[in-house]
């Protein structure tokens, strides 16, 4: 284990954890110690003990990221003066110096990060962590916390920090599936589920990757539909989709996550019409629901597929079912709300040494204007 003072912002060249010591300035709770990369046994323990932890914050998810791309684990274990320990999952590019690194908790396309703890995370804890991260020497560190903790982060992060407003939906699974079915599913959702069941829609769930080809076929069809809707050139949409979500990525996720990774696919007459990647521990993340709009019509196949995933989560004793980012789409929000989802407004934060975020947004906005892109 390598000890480093707070004046040294560059990481060690090996994989041994580094330790940084200094109380956070201007916070009511002192930050006593930081270990990075975090010891896996402590990470796993905190993840299992945190009732709010989501699968994206697990060590297995970071392992999947490192297998897919040129990432490395830079997770940070914090010890505070009040006796609490908290873990921030972080990844950075393996071959890029920290001074040029666009690191994240988590990077774009890999879900959310934020603090994991067996104790409630307070605003003072967040302030101390933000203060520590700003001195780490990253070109930019993005933090996208659990949507349910959005209010705490909003209270703690200084107003000068760049941010992007986000919106996600979460289903409260308390009371079990009977409670969710009767009181949280809308009447229209229950109707669509029964309609799909009567029509013979088949929903399959796979833990080992057997359904990945069906999922990826639907992903390609969805990419083409999104391109038409957004007025994006199809070759560009396919290139972006393949770069961000190659089929290899989904296979690596299945291998790294094991039984926690489930692919749900709904079939009509043997053809896949809806699919979803579900990550399940004590809480659930549903990622990338993809549909074939032409085949699925108003069959209720997507409703039945999500009903099966939610019911399985309830049976496993999960507490929350995170439905993922909803953005400003009314259709997506309505679908999630019909399944019992509650909307949470939160923010993604960018701790940066240079105005990278503003420059990135300006470039993207210019390209979108050039191709007449419609969000």
Image: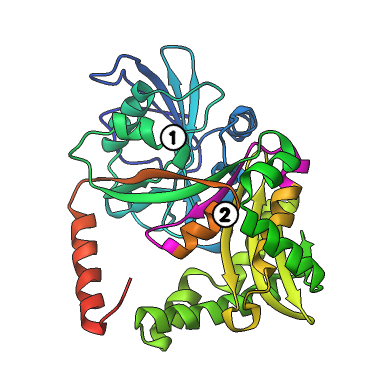
For the point 63% across and 34% down, which residue is it? 44
Percent x, y for residue 356?
22, 56
Q: Is residue 172 left or right of residue 355?
A: right
Mark 2 closeness class: few <14, some 14–19, many ≥20 residues within 10 Å: some
Q: Secondary structure at mark 1?
A: helix
Number of residue marks: 2
Q: Looking at the picture, how far across and down is residue 260, in whole percent?
A: 71, 49
> Is 320 one of the magenta-colored residues?
yes
Above or below, 72 against 11 in this view is below
Query: In the image shown, does 273 or 239 lie closer to the viewer?
Result: 273
Q: Is residue 31 left or right of residue 359?
A: right
Front residue of 241 and 286: 286
For the question of whether residue 343 can be seen, the reply is yes
Q: Is residue 278 magenta?
A: no
Q: Position of residue 342 (x, y in %)?
A: 50, 44
Placement of 76 over or under 242, stated as above or below: above
Say if 304 sits above or below 314 in the image. Answer: below
Magenta range is 313-330
| Circle 1 residue | 149
User: Which quadrant of the figure has residue 218?
Assistant: bottom right
Q: Nearer the viewer, mark 1 or mark 2?
A: 2
The residue carrying mark 2 is 338
Q: Quadrant of residue 153?
A: top left
């Amino acid at each position: 284990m390598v000890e480093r003072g707070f004046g040294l912002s560059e990481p060690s060249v090996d994989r041994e954890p580094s330790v940084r010591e200094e109380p956070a300035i201007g916070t009511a709770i002192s930050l006593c110690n930081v270990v990075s990369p975090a010891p896996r046994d402590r990470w796993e323990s905190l993840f299992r003990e945190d009732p709010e932890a989501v699968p994206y914050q697990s060590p297995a998810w970071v392992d999947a990221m490192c297998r897919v791309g040129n990432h490395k684990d830079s997770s940070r274990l914090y010890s505070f003066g009040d006796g609490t320990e908290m873990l921030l999952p972080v990844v950075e590019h393996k071959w890029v110096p920290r001074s040029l690194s666009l690191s994240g908790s988590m990077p774009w396309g890999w879900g959310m990060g934020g603090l994991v703890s067996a104790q409630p995370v307070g605003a003072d804890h967040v302030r101390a962590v933000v203060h520590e991260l700003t001195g780490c020497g990253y070109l930019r560190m993005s933090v996208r916390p659990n949507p349910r903790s959005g209010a705490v982060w909003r209270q703690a992060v200084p107003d000068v920090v760049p941010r992007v407003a986000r919106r996600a939906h979460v289903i409260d699974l308390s009371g079990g599936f009977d409670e969710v079915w009767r009181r949280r599913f809308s009447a229209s959702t229950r109707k669509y589920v029964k309609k799909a069941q009567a029509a013979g829609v088949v929903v399959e769930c796979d833990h080992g990757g057997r359904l990945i080809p069906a999922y990826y076929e639907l992903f390609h069809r969805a990419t083409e539909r999104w391109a038409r809707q957004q007025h994006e050139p199809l070759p560009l949409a396919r290139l972006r989709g393949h770069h961000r979500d190659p089929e290899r990525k989904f296979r690596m996720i299945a291998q790294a996550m094991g039984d926690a990774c489930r692919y749900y696919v709904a079939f009509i007459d043997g053809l896949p019409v809806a699919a979803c990647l579900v990550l399940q521990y004590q809480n659930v993340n549903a990622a990338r629901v993809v549909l074939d709009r032409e085949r699925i019509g108003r069959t209720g196949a997507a409703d039945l597929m999500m009903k099966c995933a939610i019911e399985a989560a309830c049976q496993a004793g999960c507490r929350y079912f995170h439905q993922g980012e909803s953005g400003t789409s009314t259709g997506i929000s309505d679908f999630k709300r019909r399944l019992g989802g509650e909307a949470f407004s939160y923010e993604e934060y960018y701790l940066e040494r240079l105005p990278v975020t503003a420059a990135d947004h300006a470039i993207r906005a210019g390209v979108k204007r050039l191709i007449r892109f419609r969000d």
